[in-house]
Image: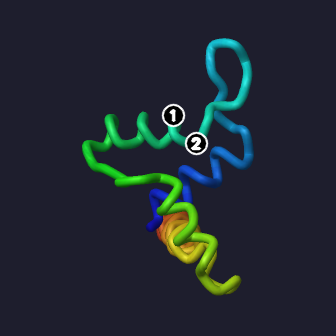
Amino acid sequence: MGITEITCGLHYLEAVTGKNGNPTHLNHLASHFEQGLNFSFGDIYDRQDALFRRKACNLTKGLDAMRAAIIRESRRRNNS
């Protein structure tokens, strides 16, 4: 579910734009992730719905885990 969080997050931030400068549609963004990472979401809108059905405290659990891993690695490197 972590890649769904990333994809939806980038979509809602409007962080990825097309050649025309407009924000990329969720299904196009998902398609690029699928091609680039060689996997399938199935239906990205079903995955998005599953994400929003989570309890509020679990909405970003994948992103929270990645954040914690980056902080841990940063501390490890700064202590070296």
Which residue corresponds to the image point at 32% horizontal and 35% vertical from the top-left?
35
Residue identified by numbered label 2:
26
Which residue corresponds to the image point at 56% horizontal and 70% vertical from the top-left?
51
Q: Is residue 58 above or below residue 4?
A: below
Which residue corresponds to the image point at 35% horizontal and 42% vertical from the top-left?
34
Left or right position of 69 against 37 = right
Looking at the image, can residue 79 be seen? no
State yes or no: discs 1 and 2 in contact (Cβ < 8 Å): yes
Residue identified by numbered label 1:
28
Mark 1, residues whose alpha carbon is within 10 Å: few (<14), some, or many (≥20)?
few
Identity of the amino acid at label 2?
Leu
Q: Quadrant of residue 36?
A: top left
Which residue corresponds to the image point at 42% horizontal and 34% vertical from the top-left?
32
Left or right position of 13 against 25 = right
Residue 27, position as x, y percentages in the image: 52, 40
As measured in the structure, the alpha-carbon distance from the residue carrying label 1 to the one carrying label 2 is 5 Å
Looking at the image, can residue 70 be seen? yes
Identity of the amino acid at label 1?
His
Q: Quadrant of the N terminus?
A: bottom left
Which type of secondary structure does the marked residue at label 1 adopt? helix
